[in-house]
Image (cartoon, rainbow, N blue to C red):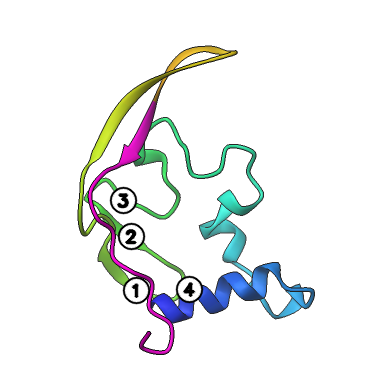
Amino acid sequence: MDQELIEHLEAKVSAESARSHPLIDLFIPTIDSEHGICYTDPEKLPGITLSGLSKHFFQCNSRAFKRGTWTCREIQSEYGLHAMWHKTGNTLPVMVNGR
């Protein structure tokens, strides 16, 4: 699954964007977003259900949070005080071609 996701991302950012999947922008909107992956709540992450399952357009269901937990941290910014969610603990490595 990691390799397939990497291939979709490479197709999206390459000069030949015509070969990227037509629905990739629905599932990976953070590439062009000014906020990146720092949403105010993990439930707002794209493609993740409240049960913690991730759903991708290539028909894979897996646990979205295999290790670690989410912690809330208050951040002071120019827009005031707000909460940001961060994943803690170890994450699984991305595998491409078995490496």
Rounded to the nearest angstrom, the CA distance separating label 3 from label 2 is 6 Å
Asked if residue 4 lies in the magenta stretch, the reply is no
Which residue type does callout 3 highlight?
Thr
Using the image, determine if residue 41 lies above or below residue 31.
above
Tag 3 and tag 2, C-beta contact below 8 Å: yes
Q: Residue at x 23, y 49 (%)?
A: 89
Q: Quadrant of residue 53?
A: bottom left
Q: Which label belongs to residue 54?
A: 2
Dominant SS of magenta comes to: loop
Which residue type does callout 1 highlight?
Cys
Q: Residue at x 79, y 74 (%)?
A: 15
Tag 2 and tag 1, C-beta contact below 8 Å: yes
Secondary element at tag 2: strand
Front residue (pair 83, 51): 83
Q: Which label belongs to residue 5?
A: 4
Point out the image quarter for the C terminus.
bottom left
* 80 sits left or right of 55 in the view: right
Q: Which label belongs to residue 49?
A: 3
Disc 3 or 4, which lies upstream in sequence? 4
Front residue (pair 47, 65): 65
